[in-house]
Amino acid sequence: MSPSLNNIGASRRLGDVLLARGLVGHDDLRKGLEYQRETGARPGEALVVLGCLTEEQLAEALASQRGLDVLDPTATYPNPAAVNLLTEKFVRARHAIPVDFRDDAIVLAMVNPLDVVTIDDLRIITGKNVIPAVATATGMADAIDLFFDGKSQLNGATVEQSTDATNGEPDKEETQDFSVVKVVDDILDTALKRHASDIHFEPQADGLVVRIRLDGVLHHLTTLPPSRRAGVISRIKILGDMDIAEKRLPQDGRATYVRDGEEVDIRIASLPTVYGENITLRLLEVSMSSISLQDLGMGTNELKTFRSAIRRPHGQVLITGPTGSGKSTSLYAALEELNQPGVKIYTVEDPVERKMPGILQTQIRSNIGLTFASTLRSLVRSDPDIIMVGEIRDYETALIATEASLTGHLVLSTLHTNDAPATVSRLLEMGLPPYLIASSLECVVAQRLARKLCRHCAKQVHLTPSTMTTADREFFGKKVVDVFEPVGCRRCFNTGYSGRIGLFEVLPITKELRRLILDQASADDIRQAAATGWMRTLRQDGVKKVLAGITSVEEVQRVTT
């Protein structure tokens, strides 16, 4: 027999099996080989396409070749605990579905039992042995459709945990079956229950440290043993439709989690480290109710000034602060108020954190050339009234945004500066001419987010000059004041804080400030000029909120230092 005829695909033995069973002849194998070379079809698939074999005959031959069982995944409804080990995307891409447990192993129905990569991936994710079985392509497609149709999924994987009908507790046997999958789901559930904004999976020499960010501060959640590290990271990467084999380069992914009817958008980022890949999950509640300007925490004068600025027909309004200071939330609150039937609003964001009805939102994709600058150029030709730019990062974006604000558009955007007066210096450093800044800028808002004291456990303290700390004297001088301090209770997870409130510094651009900008005055000069007016600094706004019992001295000091 000619070797070429038996080398169809990757296995010589498959040709032997098919010939020995009398299912095909030498001419059939020759035709199959030619078709495979032209199309890249899998072993045996070419023969099915050419009509030389049925799917059932191929499955029987593959099973005989490898000493495996033939399994019809539609004959018996798959075990949900097994199927939930992988996402729908993964299952459809690999043409393989876990259908049951046998002893301490997973039964994996596969169209191609030679796919050792998929077998290894499932073994890594679950920490269990894998028993492959052969299924037809049609049977596989039907089984996937039957199981996943209409289910609430995390990128295809159902997130509801099975519970014991008698007491509502997770079934012990099923908990063991879930293995790594249940660990990841439990961490997600815990983070969402506590209203965490981020989850950090940090590989260390002694295991995988899991921390969650609550109200802007990281808290230790658990430490998983080293044996779970690879499986947990692989599971998360699969959920984010990321390449689990790529461990040397950073990757980005996203998933959608549905819990109690609420949809949460998850942004996933991986970064290689000495002990393995660090995984960070950003949790964005898609269905989260919108926040109004009144809820941000601005004082009466600040709110009036800000509202006046965003209601102007043109000009620039900038919100500044470090990452995680609530700039996007303030922008969304402004857009919520401006979103009226007679106004056309465009946004350019990276990423789109909240979908807003009635507003046209564009997601930046720098890898294909869709940048802030290129998108802005197109937007100004689309007859907008208001443009929101997620962030001004470079000279080109700053210039286009400024020019748009001078041609009849209101432009809202963010910038990274320490305070409002420093914004002008930052724009000058980017290369914008002073006259453009002076002509376009209407208002600058600097902000921080301070944690609010838990109203259930906060303790009132009477401060006198003799009992004050150095920080207290910085805030109150020698005044006798009553303030509140954090304690910690069950309701606030023993942090002493629950929720956050904004600290604001609102700087309207007056005629005097425009003159200083044209003269390229320093940030200190602008700060001094602003101080002669009514502008309250971030620290001063914080002191006001401390005296009102909303937050603590330590917290204001932490976010404003």
Image: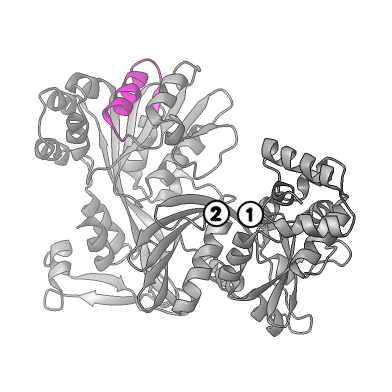
User: Does residue 221 appear left or right of residue 448 in this picture?
Assistant: right
Q: Nearer the viewer, residue 10 or 417?
A: 10
Q: Are marks 2 and 1 in contact (CB under 8 Å)?
A: yes
Can residue 19 be spotted in the picture? yes
Q: Badge 2: how crowded within 10 Å, few (<14), some, or many (20+)?
A: many
The three-letter amino acid code for the residue at tag 2 is Gly
Name the residue that disc number 2 marks.
240
Seen at 72% across and 83% down, the residue is 103
Q: Quadrant of the C terminus?
A: bottom left
Seen at 31% across and 59% down, the residue is 545
- Asked whether 323 falls inside the magenta stretch, the response is no
Q: Is residue 354 above or below residue 487?
A: above
On the image, the x and y values in percent for residue 92 come to 70, 52
User: Does residue 560 appear left or right of residue 316 in this picture?
Assistant: left
On the image, the x and y values in percent for residue 118 come to 63, 61
Magenta-tinted stretch: 393-411
Q: Quadrant of residue 482?
A: bottom left
- Asked whether 409 falls inside the magenta stretch, the response is yes
Name the residue that disc number 1 marks.
155
Q: Nearer the viewer, residue 296 or 433?
A: 433
Q: Quadrant of residue 177?
A: bottom right
